[in-house]
């Protein structure tokens, strides 16, 4: 039974008012705003994903064991892991500090303390190996024999974690779309048309676009997993008439994927329809205990909205 | 690359690693940005400093100079080098310095005791009229306030060169070995030893002499030029990344980076024409060279400093060599040597305890220099070193010059073993060395050092 426009508006209005809103959950407006912000950031990032001056002559990577191989991670990825560890550790320390302060609250003779991780310093003794694909790999010596055969180079680094600068937050704010009052696409006919385009893309791998610098991601598999599940779980955010955002939260609420669908409808002034294209913008696994509180809020809010969308669609679909 | 880089590949390497730092910073900023977008402000991890220290060997093949960064070379021709590149954030308001090859100030940092550009008149005075040509003399200002002038005329003849010493009173004497013993007077060489040691420990700074590279296509100049280009490539890579950030939002999270310092330490074996020795020919000479390049008053300054090869005034290896003299077999041998001709029998009956005590107090100021190296195979060699030890012995200040041989295994970890039977006391007496002499092999070492400095300055046309 097709829904009338009034009915759809009513559904959207119902979705915007959360039934129960625990403190760490987001309201509908905030949720959509965040999704749009994520989209804007991801798009912005993908514009310059390759960087302007990467020489490409030698791409240092870190490899464990002899002569590189598949075990290697790229140099930037190594520092990213270190940075993430630094932030995660500080987060644990923050939690411990909170717990400690709570425990000494009634003991004035014990001064309150917070625990900080001021910096992370490291030194790596590495060798260099060459690979056909990646240029040079950094080799972590597995044994003494390797250390004897290779020149021993040294990489020293120092990292620190600081709050995001004000300019950065302001720049982020500037990315917000002017119109925040965007409703979910709930009309079955509209949703059906969207999913026809999605199916077209799933059938042709070349119409699936993966995020830049994620060569290891099997986008077709991710797409099949996302859209093979019950489609009533997919949220459609029509931020752009020709390119709605598709949000898919897996049924176990463990993985969130954000897609942009370029519709097979003619652009203004064109008569021919363009080929549809489905681009994976963001894929975020929910890691127990490691996910940022804000991201946890996003997962929680999405789970709530998805649940209610499924309920509403089953009632009117 | 087949295990090695051509010399021209050096800038490629430094640019890539500088790029890698910029990429890492961008990746960290993206991560922080994504976290902030998903859940509000988050802590942003930042790279405060990254430094790369590369060990490599340089070898001249039949056609070119190659750099071995990957596997070790066990070859007599491979010379060791170290490169260090440190990258640090630069203030956001200051745009990172760009590299301008035309704005480089080359400075040669010579040992303070070298009179680098003598006049013809000074040469005539120093050689008592034997020569007026600056190119064929090495002039060394030694002793307190450089009051003694050691002049080596035609230094390529090593111990057969004409060596003259002018004292503070202006008296010039020609140094010669004693016709009976064949030994050279010790005091002038002790002055030279002290000057070299003060230089090697950095107790005295070198003299900076501006110079322009001759543009000659010699290996020595090419190495210097490529090092500067390698620095420039890293500076450029970071500047370009800062000026054209990946995106405007991530740029607000990211830092700008610049090259904080770039240094190289090389031990080169050169022929007099400035090219690397392709074979261990007798005309080749070896000198350590330190290069440091940095921005200075809006320009780029390159300091090229000579080092002393095979001369240890500090460091782990020196400490290990000195410690080996304290082993039981070595101390027993030292007791016998102290009682022998070096002391004129004056120290007969010295106890092992007294020897150990002397070694302990002399260790802090001891210098060790290698006068001979014999390769047994690609990794094993036998080095002969001289130790200069000063300390109190039976209530008197004494100087002990000691010769000893070591078996060296140059594997992943350097292993040295003292041949205690090789320990020979060359001199044991007054610290001024007034009553002592040096054998021709040791004098040859000092003359080879003087010749190396002289030739090196000639190679770069300083």
Image (spheres, coloured by chain):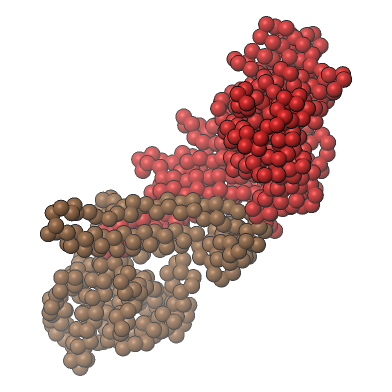
Chain colours: A brown, B red
The location of residue B13, given as percent across then percent down, is 59, 51
Residue at 77% in and 42% down = B421
Q: Is residue A27 above or below residue B269?
A: below
Residue at 67% in and 14% down = B148
Q: Could you tell whether B337 is left or right of A233 in the image? A: right
The location of residue A316, given as percent across then percent down, is 18, 91
Of residue A168 and residue B164, the one placed in the foreground of this image is B164
Is any atom of residue B251 visible in this view? no
Is any atom of residue A173 visible in this view? yes
The location of residue B167, given as percent across then percent down, is 69, 10
Pick out the residue farthest to the right. B180
Quarter of the figure with residue B308: top right
Pick out the residue farthest to the front. B349
Identify the image quadrant of the C terminus of chain A.
Answer: bottom left
Q: Could you tell whether A309 is left or right of B212 in the image? A: left
Identify the image quadrant of the N terminus of chain A.
Answer: bottom left
Residue at 39% in and 73% down = A279
The location of residue A11, given as percent across then percent down, is 15, 82
Of residue B48 and residue A182, the one placed in the foreground of this image is B48
Quarter of the figure with residue B182: top right
Residue at 24% in and 79% down = A303
Q: Could you tell whether A178 is left or right of A281 in the image? A: left
Q: Is residue B366 above or below residue A269?
A: above
Q: Could you tell whether B390 is left or right of A220 in the image? A: right
């Amino acid at each position: 039974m097709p829904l009338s426009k009034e009915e759809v508006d009513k559904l959207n209005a119902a979705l915007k008012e959360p039934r129960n809103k625990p403190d760490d959950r987001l309201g509908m407006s905030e949720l959509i705003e965040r999704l749009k912000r994520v989209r804007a950031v991801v798009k912005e990032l993908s514009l310059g994903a390759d960087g302007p001056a990467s020489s490409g002559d030698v791409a240092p990577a870190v490899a464990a064991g002899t002569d590189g191989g598949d075990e290697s991670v790229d140099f930037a990825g190594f520092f990213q892991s270190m940075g993430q560890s630094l932030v995660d550790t500080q987060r644990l320390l923050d939690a411990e500090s909170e717990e400690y302060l709570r425990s000494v609250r009634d003991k004035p003779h014990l001064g309150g303390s917070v625990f900080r991780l001021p910096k992370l310093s490291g030194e790596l003794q590495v060798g260099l190996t060459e690979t056909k694909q990646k240029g040079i790999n950094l080799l972590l010596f597995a044994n003494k024999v390797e250390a004897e055969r290779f020149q021993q180079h040294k990489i020293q680094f120092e990292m620190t974690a600081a709050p995001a600068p004000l300019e950065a937050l302001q720049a982020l704010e500037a990315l917000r779309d002017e119109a925040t009052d965007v409703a979910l696409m709930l009309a079955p006919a509209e949703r059906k048309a969207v999913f026809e385009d999605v199916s077209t893309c799933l059938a042709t791998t070349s119409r699936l676009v993966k995020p830049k610098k994620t060569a290891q991601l099997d986008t077709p598999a991710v797409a099949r997993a996302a859209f093979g599940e019950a489609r009533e779980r997919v949220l459609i955010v029509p931020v752009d008439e020709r390119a709605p955002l598709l949000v898919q939260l897996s049924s176990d609420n463990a993985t969130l994927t954000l897609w942009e669908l370029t519709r097979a409808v003619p652009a203004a002034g064109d008569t021919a329809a363009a080929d549809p294209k489905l681009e994976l913008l963001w894929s975020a696994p929910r890691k127990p205990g490691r996910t940022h509180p804000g991201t946890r809020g996003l997962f929680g809010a999405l789970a709530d909205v998805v649940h209610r969308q499924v309920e509403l669609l089953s009632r009117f679909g | 690359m087949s295990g090695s880089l051509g010399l021209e590949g050096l800038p490629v390497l430094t640019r890539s690693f500088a790029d890698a730092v910029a990429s890492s910073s961008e990746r960290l900023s993206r991560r922080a940005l994504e976290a902030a977008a998903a859940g509000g402000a988050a802590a942003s991890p930042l790279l405060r400093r990254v430094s790369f220290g590369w060990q490599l060997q340089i070898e001249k093949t039949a056609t070119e100079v190659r750099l071995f960064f990957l596997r070790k070379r066990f070859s007599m021709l491979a010379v060791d080098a170290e490169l260090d590149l440190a990258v640090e954030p630069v203030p956001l308001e200051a745009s990172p310095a760009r590299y301008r090859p035309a704005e480089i100030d080359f400075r040669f940092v010579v040992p303070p005791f070298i009179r680098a550009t003598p006049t013809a008149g000074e040469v005539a005075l120093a050689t008592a009229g034997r020569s007026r040509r600056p190119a064929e003399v090495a002039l060394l200002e030694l002793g307190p306030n450089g009051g003694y002038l050691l002049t080596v005329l035609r230094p390529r003849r090593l111990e057969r060169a004409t060596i003259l010493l002018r004292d503070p009173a202006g008296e010039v004497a020609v140094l010669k070995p004693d016709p009976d013993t064949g030994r050279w007077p010790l005091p002038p060489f002790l002055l030279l030893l002290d000057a070299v040691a003060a230089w090697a420990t950095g107790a005295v700074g070198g003299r900076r002499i501006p110079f322009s590279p001759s543009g000659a296509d010699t290996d020595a100049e090419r190495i210097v030029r490529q090092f500067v280009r390698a620095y420039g490539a890293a500076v450029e890579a970071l500047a370009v990344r800062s000026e054209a950030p990946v995106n405007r939002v991530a740029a607000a999270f990211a830092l700008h980076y610049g090259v904080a310092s770039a240094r190289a330490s090389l031990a080169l074996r050169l022929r007099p024409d400035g090219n690397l020795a392709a074979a261990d020919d007798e005309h080749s000479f070896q000198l350590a060279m330190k290069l440091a390049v940095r921005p200075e008053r809006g320009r780029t300054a390159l300091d090229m400093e000579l080092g002393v090869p095979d001369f240890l005034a500090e460091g782990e290896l020196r400490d290990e060599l000195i410690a080996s003299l304290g082993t039981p077999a070595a101390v027993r041998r030292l007791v016998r040597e102290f009682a022998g001709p070096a002391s004129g029998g004056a120290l007969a009956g010295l106890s092992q305890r007294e020897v150990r005590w002397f070694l302990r107090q002399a260790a802090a100021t001891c210098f060790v220099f290698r006068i001979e190296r014999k390769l047994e195979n690609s990794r094993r060699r036998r080095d002969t070193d001289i130790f200069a030890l000063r300390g109190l012995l039976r209530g008197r200040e004494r100087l002990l010059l000691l010769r000893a041989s070591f078996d060296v295994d140059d594997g992943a970890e350097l292993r040295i073993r003292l041949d205690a039977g090789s320990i020979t006391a060359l001199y044991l007496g007054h610290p001024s060395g007034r009553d002592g002499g040096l054998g021709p092999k040791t004098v040859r070492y000092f003359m080879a050092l003087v010749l190396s400095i002289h030739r090196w300055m000639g190679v770069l046309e300083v």
